[in-house]
Amino acid sequence: MALAWNDWQRISKTRKQHKCEVTGESIPIGSACWKFTGVYEGEFQRWYCTDEAKQFWDKLPHDPDGYECSIVGDMMREASKNAV
């Protein structure tokens, strides 16, 4: 099932610590990041990601079924290994 609704919100300064759902990295208090809110496969989701993860995500080709965070994280790790 395709993504039904989503919204990305820029967070300029977090009030508490979060975890990047894409990379698994910690997002410390006071950091800038992105918050995703939406419905995917009928389930409501809200999660955070780093600027780097969002930039990488934005460069991916459109997929009408959407991407899973863990898959994008794997693709980011693979791209960084190939860049070295």
Image: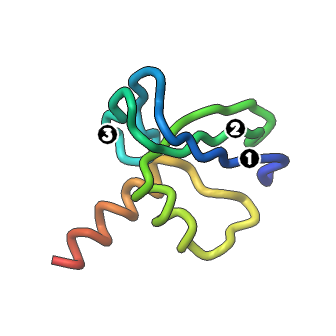
The three-letter code of the residue at mark 3 reads Glu
Q: Residues within 10 Å of mark 3 (few under 14, many from 20)?
A: few
The three-letter code of the residue at mark 2 reads Thr
Q: Residues within 10 Å of mark 1 (few under 14, many from 20)?
A: few
Q: Where is residue 70 in the image (x, y as percent from the top left)?
A: 45, 47
Mark linked to residue 7:
1
Instruction: Find residue 38 and report its image quarter.
Output: top right
Circle nearer the N terminus (3, 1): 1
Instruction: Find residue 19 and report its image quarter.
Output: top left
Would you say the residues marked 3 and 1 are in contact, meaning their CB atoms lie under 8 Å apart?
A: no
Residue at the left extreme, as displayed = 84
Would you say the residues marked 1 and 2 are in contact, meaning their CB atoms lie under 8 Å apart?
A: yes
Q: Is residue 2 above or below residue 40?
A: below
Q: In this view, does 72 lie above or below 13?
A: below
Q: In whole angstroms, how far apart are the C-alphas of marks 3 and 1? A: 21 Å
Query: In the image, what residue occupies the spot 65% across and 45% down?
Result: 9
Pointer 3 residue: 25
The three-letter code of the residue at mark 1 reads Asp
